[in-house]
Amino acid sequence: METDLPDRATTHEQVREYYARTLKTAADLKTSACCPIDAIPLHIRPLVEKLDPEVIERSYGCGSPIPDELEGRTVLDLGCGTGRDVFVASQLVGEQGAVIGLDMTAEQLEVGERLRESHAERFGHSRSNVRFVQGVLEDLGAAGIERDSVDVVISNCVLNLAPDKRPVLEEIVRVLKPGGELYFSDVFTDRRLPPELARDPVLVGECLGGALYMEDFRRLMAGVGLLDHRTVASGVIELEDPAVVRKAGMATFFSHTVRAFHLASLEDRCEDFGQVATYRGTIPHAPHSWRLDDHHEFETGRPMLVCGNTAAMLSETRFSAHFEVVGDRSTHFGLFDCGPGAVPGPDTGSAACC
């Protein structure tokens, strides 16, 4: 597990300094972590193109953490910056939904707040469904985020900036409704980094110093009750600055998009109960197939044998209307015979085993 953690106050100040004053646009980053628009899913790109250029230029994410089926939901974006993903989600939740953008950097929030009403007009909304709040990931309650109040928590290359990830994950679980989802993109690494790198202000600001070692992440997720997380997308991050390579070139860094559901019925291994799931083809942008994770692609109308965890993810969440799940847990057939998809990066172990 994480040991010799950097001081929280010091790290927060390093992050504020880096994102408020050092970085002016995404072009100032020293790695390939920033997600260009051509890496964003096709159905999301038109929504991004509606945003003010100032929001786009100051977006520093490493993925596209926008899951499906958000209409009418409450979405919380942790470390929202100037609001790129907030404003994308705003379009998807519609006027009956709500999006909360939380960040601790006032200079970033000022941009989003200044453009909040103009974006509502761009989207054809009679009023803004967006709220920006200043706060830290470790204490969402202080920012007014109540227990069991959020359907989906998203985050884009931000959890790594927290020196101690456990209280952040505990807060996420606290605010998620039962059946809610954590869906985020972040930087991971194949090893624990030396403490001096975890404190280096440039590496911290570049989302490398606090990168999550995959095995520690698996243990942390299990420790807060998120027993089965799934990798949705993955890629290798290139270190493009010679000084960064000299400091951290011994490690390999990855961008992963991960999802985890807040479900009491999930187990820490994939168990076989003989359940079968069939996708109805009813998610608007996915008429032919829909992807749960890197090794579950559901073809419309084609039954698929699934483990108990996958069955729960499809039948006990907001996706239930789009699937027919046959069977229950009355008869157990042992471990489900499957493995993680072939994606870049270290073995993610049983946390994504089915």
Image (spheres, rainbow, N blue to C red):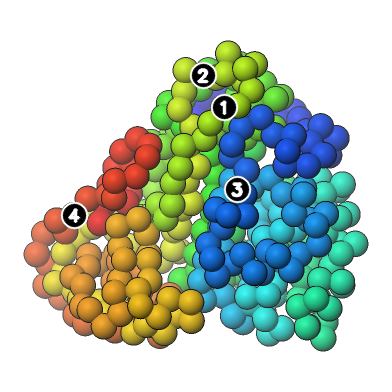
Q: In the picture, residue 336 is in which quadrant?
A: bottom left
Marks 4 and 2 close (CB-CB < 8 Å):
no
Give left or right: position of 277 versus 17.
Answer: left
The residue carrying mark 2 is 249
Give left or right: position of 165 versus 226.
Answer: right
| Res 94 seen here | yes
Above or below, 139 against 88 in this view is: above
Mark 2 or mark 4, which is nearer the start of the sequence?
2
Marks 3 and 4 close (CB-CB < 8 Å):
no
Query: What is the quadrant of the N terminus in the image?
Result: top left
The residue carrying mark 4 is 338
Please state which of the two labelled residues, at mark 4 or mark 1, is closer to the viewer: 1
Which structural element holds mark 1?
Answer: loop
Residue 74 placed where, x, y %?
63, 73
Query: What amino acid type should be assigned to the residue bearing mark 4?
Result: Cys
Which circle marks residue 13 in the picture?
Answer: none
Above or below, 236 against 310 in this view is: above
Q: CA distance from mark 1 to mark 2?
A: 8 Å
Q: CA distance from mark 3 to mark 4?
A: 31 Å
Query: What amino acid type should be assigned to the residue bearing mark 2?
Result: Gly
The residue carrying mark 3 is 35
Marks 1 and 2 close (CB-CB < 8 Å):
yes
Which structural element holds mark 4?
Answer: loop
Q: Residue at x 59, y 39 (%)?
A: 33
Mark 2 or mark 1, which is nearer the start of the sequence?
1
Mark 4 or mark 3, which is nearer the start of the sequence?
3
Which circle marks residue 239 in the picture?
Answer: 1
Mark 3 or mark 1, which is nearer the start of the sequence?
3
Residue 338 placed where, x, y %?
18, 54
Alpha-carbon neighbours of circle 2 within 10 Å: few (<14), some, or many (≥20)? few
